[in-house]
């Protein structure tokens, strides 16, 4: 796609010439394939650019909605010719991971560009309530939702994998790009998960909390150590040489705390 957009034309695997391709993020693509105008994308996008509808298009869309599928329409030379219904398969660890996050105090929501019926089916299976479910969300709406959540609820973690998620990932307090995500999402995120599934997110949250806890412990120990030794030295209870020897021990103590915490399993 990038090659076609930059050079104006390219050849696909079957040897067909692809040219004049344009990509509208979150909606669809347009171009010419062997001299034929082709539009592929969401129903609203395709109908916006196609001047003739298929007689069965509404029936196709209704059927896919009843089956909780995300519809994609295909128009050729200005007329809608075909439709496809897509569905994401939930990962095996999804329900357990979300339950663990909720138990840790996190409010979990779904922010998706897919059709409402498809998103509602996934949300129902995962136990995500309506208030936290946002379907048919454009990249701009995803960004607005993250920014609103930050202002209303505080810290926000955004997990995504697509081009449509990049702006929201960048706007979140912590953006997490998952394994196999688009390159632009990796660039926008703060964290990249090298393993597939949602279990690594739970591990990330646990390690993050542990890191903050270790930092607080280290600061507390270091402050207490320095206050005590400095007070003893100023009171004449220990000589300056002994105080100078004891001072580096506070740093070693903080290092020992960090090493002990780092050796535990997630």
Image (spheres, grey):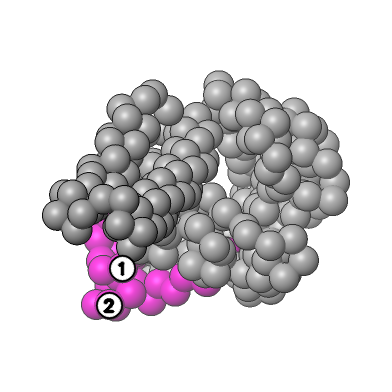
Residue marked by disc 1? 2
Residue at position x 83%, y 41% in the image: 129
Residue marked by disc 2? 6
Nearest the viewer among 139 and 128 is: 128
Mark 1 and mark 2 residues within 8 Å of each other at the beta carbon: yes
Q: Count residues near mark 1 (Cα–Cα under 10 Å), then give few for <14, some for 14-19, many for 20+.
A: few
**Could you tell me which quadrant the N terminus lies in?**
bottom left
Disc 1 element: helix
Quadrant in which residue 182 is drawn: bottom left
**Could you tell me which quadrant the C terminus lies in?**
top left
Q: Does residue 2 show up magenta in the picture?
A: yes
Q: Is residue 56 among what the camera can see?
A: no
Is 220 situated above or below 265? below
Q: Which mark is residue 135?
A: none
Residue farthest toward the right in the current orientation of the protein? 130
Quadrant in which residue 74 is drawn: bottom right
Residue 46, position in %: x, y?
64, 65
């Amino acid at each position: 796609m990038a090659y076609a957009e930059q050079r104006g034309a390219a050849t696909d695997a079957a040897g067909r010439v692809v040219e004049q391709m344009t990509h509208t993020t979150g909606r669809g693509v347009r171009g010419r394939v062997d001299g034929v105008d082709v539009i592929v994308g969401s129903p609203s996008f395709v109908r916006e650019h196609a001047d003739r509808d298929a007689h069965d298009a509404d029936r196709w869309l209704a059927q896919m909605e009843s089956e909780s599928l995300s519809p994609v329409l295909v128009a050729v030379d200005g007329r809608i010719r075909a439709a496809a219904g897509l569905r994401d398969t939930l990962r095996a660890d999804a329900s357990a991971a979300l339950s663990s996050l909720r138990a840790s105090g996190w409010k979990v929501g779904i922010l998706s560009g897919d059709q409402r019926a498809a998103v509602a089916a996934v949300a129902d299976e995962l136990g995500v309530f309506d208030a936290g479910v946002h379907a048919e969300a454009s990249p701009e709406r995803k960004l607005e939702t993250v920014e609103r959540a930050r202002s209303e609820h505080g810290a926000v973690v955004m997990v995504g994998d697509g081009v449509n998620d990049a702006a929201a990932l960048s706007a979140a307090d912590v953006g997490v790009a998952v394994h196999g995500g688009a390159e632009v999402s990796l660039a926008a995120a703060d964290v990249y998960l090298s393993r597939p599934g949602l279990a690594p997110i739970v591990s990330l949250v646990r390690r993050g909390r542990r890191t903050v806890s270790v930092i607080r412990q280290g600061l507390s120990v270091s402050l207490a150590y320095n206050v005590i030794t400095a007070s003893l030295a100023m009171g004449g209870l220990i000589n300056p040489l002994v105080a100078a020897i004891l001072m580096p021990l506070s740093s070693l103590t903080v290092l020992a705390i960090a090493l002990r915490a780092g050796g535990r399993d997630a």
